[in-house]
Amino acid sequence: PLDRILSLEGTSFSPAVREAICLLDAEIAFDRGSTLLERLSAIRLDKQEGRRIAEGLGRELERQTVEELENAWKPAKPVPREIEATPERIYFSPDGTTVHIGKEWKEAKVGTVFTTEIPRRGQEPEREHTRYTATMGDAEDLGKRMYIEGLKLGFDPEKTKPVVVADGAHWIWNWAENSLPKERVEIIDFYHAAEKLWDVKRAVFGEDNPKGKRWAETWKGKLYNGKVAACIRGLRRLRPKTKEGRESVRKVIGYYKTNRERMRYDKFRRQGYFIGSGVTESSCKRLVGARMKQAGMRWSCKGAQAILQLRLAVLNDRWDYLWAGRGGCA
C-alpha cells in the first residue's frame, strides 16, 4: 500500500527521479542522460532502463493525444482551452524534416500554431501565444493535431481569421481547404518562393556568375513587392542553353502561376501578415533535429513519436502539468 501511495509500484525510482530521467532523455541522447544523471545525483541508471521510462511516458502522452483527437468533435468532450481570449488571427504553419527510422529516412511532420493581434498601420505583426505539434504519421494526422492546438489557443472559426503560411506542398493546401473556414488567408513562405529564383540562377547562369546574382537579387525585390506576373515574364525572357536550365525555368514558372494568389506579398505586408514560416523551420531544428538527428541515431516510429511527445511537453510549457499532483508519470 505504501508503494502505491508513493507511486513506486513496479519501479525502484521515485517520481522525482523518473521526472529527471524523462526530462534528460527528452533533451539529450539516452547514454548521455544516464551519465549526466549519475554525475549530478550519484544515481546509477542503465541507459536502456532510462529509455524504457522515458518512452513509456511518451507513449502515454501519445495515447492521450490520440484519444483527444478522437473526442475533439464530440459535444460532450470539448477540447480544453488554454487561452481564454479569442485571438484575432491564428496562423497554421506546417513543415517537415526527416528522421532515420530503421534503415531508411522517414519524414516527421511538424506544425506551428500561433496567434497575433492585427497590428496598427506601419507596425510589424508580433506572435502572442505559440504551440508546436509533430507526428511521424501522415499529413491528415498533422492537420488534426494543428487544429486541436488551435482550439486550445482559443481559435473560433466564426471570429478568428485563420492564416496558413507554408511552402507549396499540395497536401497543405488540401488540408486548409477541407479543415479551415473559406474566409482564410493562404501565403506561400516568401523565402521559399524567393529561393526558386536562386535555383534558376544556378541552373541558367552558373554558381558564381555575378550577372546571375544581380538577376536573382533584382527579381527577388520585385517578388517582395508582389510583382509575380512580372517575375513570370522575366523568367520567360531567359534563354537557357542547357536542358537543366530550361527545366528549372519551366518548373518555377509553373510554381509561380499555381501559387500567384498566395504570393501577393505587397498586399499581405500592408495588411500586417507574416509572410515567412521561419518559426516552423526553426521548430523543425529545435524539436526534431537537435535531439533526434545526431550521428548514428536510429529510431522506430513509435520510439520517435514518444520522444517527440516529451519534447512537445517541454516546448509547449506543459511539463510541470504532467507531474504536478500526480505523484509520477502522467
Image (cartoon, rainbow, N blue to C red):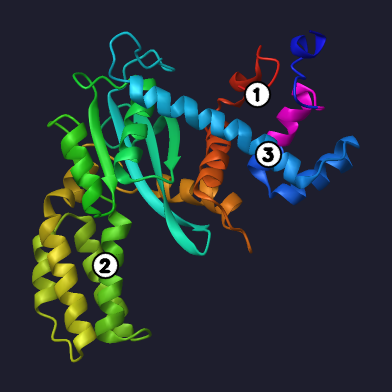
Q: Splitting the image into 4 quarters, where does residue 273 fall?
A: top left
Q: Which residue is mark 1?
A: 329
Q: Is residue 158 above or below residue 59?
A: above
Horizontal and vertical percent for residue 45?
A: 82, 41
Q: Residues within 10 Å of mark 3 (few under 14, many from 20)?
A: some
- Amino acid carrying mark 3 in the image: Arg
Label 3 – label 1 distance at C-alpha: 13 Å
Label 2 – label 1 distance at C-alpha: 47 Å
The reply to whether the C-beta atoms of the residues labelled 3 and 2 are less than 8 Å apart is: no
Of circles 3 and 1, which is in front?
3
Q: Is residue 202 above or below residue 6?
A: below
Q: Indicate yes or no whether the magenta region holds residue 21.
A: yes
Of circles 2 and 1, which is in front?
1
Horizontal and vertical percent for residue 183?
A: 13, 31
Q: Indicate yes or no whether the magenta region holds residue 75.
A: no
The residue at 25%/70% (across/down) is 197
In this view of the protein, can residue 153 be seen by the observer? no
Q: Which mark is residue 196?
A: 2
Q: Where are the magenta residues, as a range?
A: 12-23
Position of the C terminus by quadrant: top right
The residue at 24%/23% (across/down) is 160
Given residues 122 and 309, the one toward you in this image is 309
